[in-house]
Image (cartoon, rainbow, N blue to C red):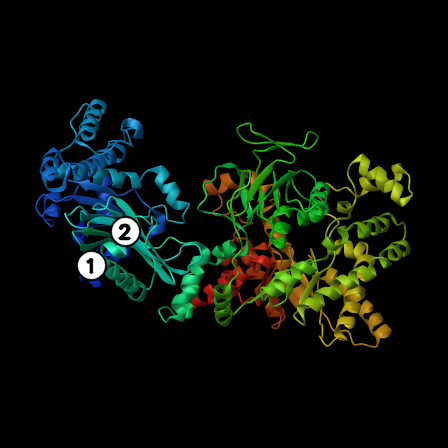
Amino acid sequence: MQKLATFKPFTEITPTASIIVAQHGGRAKCLQRLRRLNMPMPKSIALSFEAVHGIASGRMPDLDRLMRVFDEAPLLSVRPSSEDPDWGGPGAILNIGMSDTRYEEMIPRKGEAVASRLYLRFIQTWAAQVAHLDDDLFDADASPTRVTVEAALRAYEMETDEQFPQDPAVQLTGVLRSMARAWETTSARLLRQAKNAPADAGLGLIVQGMALGVGPDESGSGVIQFIEPVAGRPQITGRYLSQSQGRDALADRAGAIYLTRDPRGPSLEELCPEVFDKLIEYGEECRRRLREEMQIEFVINSGNLSILDAVRVPRSARANVAIAVSMARDGILTPAEALLRVEPRALNELLHRQVDPMHTVTPLLQGVAASPGAATGRIVFTSDRAEAMAAQDEACILVKRETNPEDVRGMHAAQGVLTEKGGMSSHAAVIARGLGVPCVVGANMIRLNRREKTLRLPGGKLLREGDVVTLDGSAGTLIDGPVPLLEPATDAALGTLLEWADEVRDIGVRANADTVEDARIARDFNAEGIGLCRTEHMFFEENRLTVMREMIFADTAEARADALKQLLPMQRSDFGRLFDIMEGRPVCIRLFDPPLHEFLPHDRAGMLELAGSLGRPLAEVQHRVEALQEYNPMLGLRGVRLGITVPEIYDMQARAIFEAAVDVGKTGNRVVPEIMLPLVSAKREVEVVRARIDTIAAAVRADTGVEIDYKLGVIVETPRAALKADEIAAHCAFLSFGTNDLTQMTYGLSRDDAGRFMGSYTRQGVFPEDPFHVLDRDGVGELLSIGANRGRAAKPDLVLSLCGEHGGNSESIAFCREAGFDYVSCSPYRVPVARLAAAHAALKSAEF
């Protein structure tokens, strides 16, 4: 952390004072900027991070010297000033200096109610934040009178066995020490670390003279801001508590100005038109000079305005986009600055339904936030039930221990998915992100009973099938019953921001798309193509699943080929529709990857049904299912290994791809399909499969008279493929790094089971982040670099990409850009996030 060259414990905030954000905090710097704008402000002192740390350790600065900056016997306030306002800090403490003597002096001048309110607030705040007494020691609803003040003082003395402090210096000492130590508690450190603050982040404190809005003429206090915080529309809103009128007045502008919440009472504009106009002027000045929409805290004392503070208006992600674009259009920001004002991950709030942040919720459980968005529906425990509910237009939340490929149709039908097992790269998480469905995984504290159709939650609460819940995939929580949801907000401002991002970024963005709907979403979000189409998901529709099972039970290559002929027109139609939708953009199709056992039932009832549909004895079905079982199927007969040992599958898929390309080509869109081989670890695997694909291409060329042009590549998922990329690249047009499996194999860690302990690992610093969520630069990243460098050394025009779930992550995109990759590919709903993240990476690299 940056330290002061010469230790100066406090500095008066003047236009020319040396106030530095990294030493005094953001609030101190903002106050100095307001003073430079000649706004009327009380005197203010900034205590540096080092001074506050010293106070926490028992080293108090010269308070007599500090207090001489203010007028004789002032009332003071102390507010926190962290480097980033979002990191928070202890609550502000006001009215320091109130004592029995000052209270008695104030009553004749200000009235008993005003004096009592000021003293009572200070007594209660001191008791809670400095003396750490229980909140219920005082009657929070008591009217401010002499009687209640005296009662509060007696309660304090009875609880502490000492008189309430009367010396302003003693009061200020206690406040400063309390706030400094509060910042350094373990709970405060963990809370700000959750907001991405460094563990050793410093805290500054602001000591400010109090401007009391309690004069004989119009007086009061309030805040005012100039944008609506949910959508970001221009709108003046401000709460003003008028001491003179004894009521609140509100100012609201939506085109015209509407000035009162209570039509029976006056508005701020009516009470003090000159002050109101001045506040509007200050708001416009903040927007123009500070280049931010600010919420201004102010006090009016007998018609005279004082500005106490100004903070960035709290806002939704949607409002933040609207504000950034508006400021750029007005010439206040450049488009590049507007882009950097919006965090890429914040776009998730615009692209999916969200729980209304204005609504307070109490979660039933906390899991891993695997796919953003929120949905309300009835609990179901099977994919079949989810499909039945969807057929009746009833929303449902699918709850399972874990999902598998057979559940894809149920996940399509459900509004949200909750699983007991899994992490960020589990099957449920990956598929849900692709579908744009809210998903929470790794909720290992729940207990499912499929037979009784119940879900037992932490604490013992029991939910049954049909109960209504809300799933918040952005927060990783489950909420009892329905809650208000905000609709997605893909408006013109977002479109403009992403257009600016496309002008800046220098790495491509494609989408992972397995279905026609995925492809349409990808195209609508301006993906530059499909970087990964997982063909196995196409085989789980009912009419195709039966054919796949016939192929699995075939005894000869000819019988397998005959069974697959039934799938050929279906696959040709699948690929043709993808080519049509993408309108000439590249489409990269990964050939069949999963082990065959995933297509077979695992319980007796399912096997009995399969035996009937195939006309085979149950014993034969059971024997085949057992024969296909593997100790570790994810490292067994799958991917290219299946393509070599059961080549008829890849033969059928290659023919379907080429025939679809020929058909679409007749409409005017020339298609050069990209075919990707999964789970490759040796160059000979590529040679063997490529020879068969070339043969199929020649056959289609002979049948159609059309020249077949295609690109063959490999998805690098094994460490050996990365290490031998130079040999593999000689037979490829591209290498695409599949970081889901590559991370799994590099760590020797199941992505489906990692959620059980990953939270503990990251909390204890074993891993800095979940490697399935944030790319591990040091380990997996080194394999990517080795593979990229060796591949390009062997073949300089080799196209490099990343197509794992890391493809939509800002850190991963920055890494790929640095490593010279051509594009990243991510789930369709993450394409806008990736486009903005790519722009951020380009802009930030240009700064250095």
**Classed neighbour count for the residue bearing mark 1: other residues with Cα under 10 Å, few (<14), some (14–19), many (≥20):** some
> Is 531 placed left or right of 594 in the picture?
left
Q: Which mark is residue 109?
A: none
Look at the image and tell me whether residue 635 can be seen.
no
Kind of residue at disc 1:
Ser
Give the mark nearest the N terminus, 2 or 1. Answer: 1
Q: Is residue 689 above or below residue 704?
A: above
- CB-based contact (under 8 Å), mark 2 and mark 1: no
The secondary structure type at the circle numbered 1 is loop
Q: Nearer the viewer, residue 409 or 762?
A: 409
**Occupied quadrant, residue 700:** bottom right
Give residue 586's position: percent from left, percent from top. Answer: 66, 69
Q: Residue at x 27, y 35 (%)?
A: 129
> Is 312 placed left or right of 785 in the picture?
left
**Residue that badge 1 annotates:** 18
> Is 62 placed left or right of 750 in the picture?
left
Give residue 421's position: percent from left, percent from top. Answer: 61, 39
**Residue that badge 2 annotates:** 266
Q: Nearer the viewer, residue 214 or 675?
A: 214
Q: Is residue 737 above or below residue 115?
A: below
**Occupied quadrant, residue 456:** top right
> Is 282 placed left or right of 563 in the picture?
left
Q: Nearer the viewer, residue 335 or 644?
A: 335
Measured in 3D between alpha carbons, the distance from the residue under mark 2 to the one under mark 1, in whole angstroms, is: 43 Å
Look at the image and tell me whether residue 706 can be seen.
yes
**Classed neighbour count for the residue bearing mark 2: other residues with Cα under 10 Å, few (<14), some (14–19), many (≥20):** some
The secondary structure type at the circle numbered 2 is loop
Residue that lies at the very extreme toward the front in this rendered image: 264
